[in-house]
Amino acid sequence: MSVANPLGINLSFCVKRWVTPNLWAPVVRDQLGLDLIQFSFDLVDPMWPAAILSRHAKEVRTAADDHGITIHSAFIGLAHYTFNQLLHPDEDVRAYAEQWLERAYGFAAEAGIQGVGGPLGAIASRPDGSEADAIDARDYASLIERMLRLGDKAKAAGLSELYVEPTPMRREWPWTIQQARQMMTDVSASATPWSLCVDWGHGTFLPLYGRQADTMEPWFAELNDVIGAVHIQQTDFQFDRHWDFTEEGRVDPVEARALLARTGLAQSPVFLEVFYPFERDSKSILDALKASAVSLKQAFA
């Protein structure tokens, strides 16, 4: 008998709307009927003063406990992702990004969250717009060095796992299955284990990968031993859409669950990750999320 993937939601949909635990916790539990989440650092800035961070961490932990919600991990969010982070051309900015993550680890630990992850950074574009097939070897070596150091810092904070999210961009790392495997090998000695959070709309970005990338099966089959979580979204394989499942797209929830089972990931947690225009009204978003949750719960039951 197959075991259903734990199904949850990333709090990306809460940005500028349900921004505090007393708002998002009842939405997740009572409106969507879910009890598993990924926290988003779009809701809390790790660089806030320590007293504010500590208060919010306690509120997150309390709200999750009161509503019977498990927080699997915390991801960096869209705001921090817009910066080049650990691959910025300025070494001082890279150091700051490392400090940002260290403070994120401290917040997560105080909030009772055991893992933190997300994309790690992007190199700058060239003046002529051309893009290489790989980042510079020195940039990669620097990134691995920082990942290993972050593993030490996460362990000191009390975390148990760190996550890398591959993205479909040549300027970020990793963006191929081979690069992801190499990275996991290169950080295998980390004091805190690193694993992958793979996104359905990233590995199926046809403009980058070509026609052979109209399925996530190669990513799941070849990396199943280093995948710790999965993001699911509705998308058309033309851009990284992050639509909900009221939109027309290429991802079928029933087929998605079958694919995970077929590739050895039947027990991996799956998180709906969706983003909405800031100007869209909150009621229509809530209705779309409810319908999407129903569709996914039926498929993953």
Image: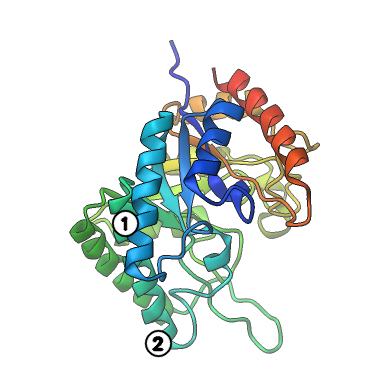
Q: Is residue 36 in sight in this rendering?
A: yes
Q: Position of residue 205 (x, y in %)?
A: 68, 52
Q: Is residue 193 above or below residue 218?
A: below
Q: Position of residue 144 (x, y in %)?
A: 33, 69
Determine which residue is flagged by label 1: 185
At label 1, which amino acid type do we have? Answer: Thr
Q: Is residue 90 above or below residue 83?
A: below
- Find residue 81 and report its image quarter: bottom right
Q: In the figure, is residue 258 to the left or right of 222? A: right
Q: Is residue 104 in sight in this rendering?
A: no
Disc 1 from disc 2: Cα separation: 27 Å
The residue depicted at 53 percent of the width and 59 percent of the height is 42
At label 2, which amino acid type do we have? Answer: Asp
Using the image as rendered, state which of residue 196 and residue 246 is in the foreground: 246
The colour scheme is rainbow
Q: Position of residue 139 (x, y in %)?
A: 42, 79
Using the image as rendered, state which of residue 255 and residue 271 is in the foreground: 271
